[in-house]
Amino acid sequence: MSQFICCLWWFVLGVLVGWLLSWVLNRLLGRSRVQEIPAPAPAPRQPAAVAAPRADDLTKIEGIGPKIAELLSANGIDSFATLSRTDVAKLWSILDTGGTRFRLANPGT
């Protein structure tokens, strides 16, 4: 037991010395300040006539097969953007309307 306590003191001392050395070097090299990342410039707006809605292949997402993609499309969710904005509770209700075979799908993940 005394051998363990002896080794524990050396470990604690090593951790403290390492932390102190890291703190001193960061202060000397000026890395202690938090640097803010500038926000990206807003994208230019495109006219509404140019941007036409398109249907994405939702089966590329793991867990969404052809049947679930068909069920989502029938409920107006046919793009990645629409799917990402849809509430999880709404996705659960859509899957519940599809029947018991969709109960294994977890839209929360």
Image (tube, rainbow, N blue to C red):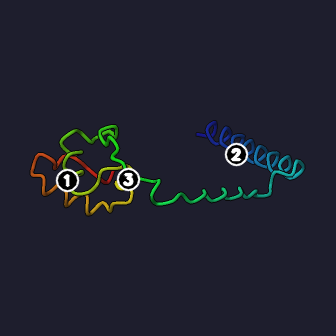
- Whole-angstrom CA distance, mark 1 to mark 2, is 62 Å
Q: Amino acid at mark 1?
A: Ala
* Sequence order check, earlier mark of 1 and 2: 2
Q: How many neighbours does mark 3 have within 10 angstroms: few (below 14), some (14-19), or many (20 or more)?
A: few
At a point 22% along the width and 58% down the height, the residue shown is 92
Q: According to the image, label 3 marks what residue? A: 53
Residue 38 image offset from top left, x and y in percent:
71, 57
Q: Quadrant of the N terminus?
A: top right
Q: Which tag is nearer the camera, tag 1 or tag 2?
A: 1
- Taking the image as shown, residue 50 lies to the left or right of residue 69, namely right
Q: Secondary structure at mark 1?
A: helix
Of 31 and 45, the residue lying toward us: 45
Q: Amino acid at mark 2?
A: Val
- Whole-angstrom CA distance, mark 2 to mark 3, is 61 Å
- Whole-angstrom CA distance, mark 3 to mark 1, is 15 Å
Q: According to the image, label 1 marks what residue? A: 74
Residue 85 image offset from top left, x and y in percent:
38, 60
Q: Amino acid at mark 3?
A: Pro
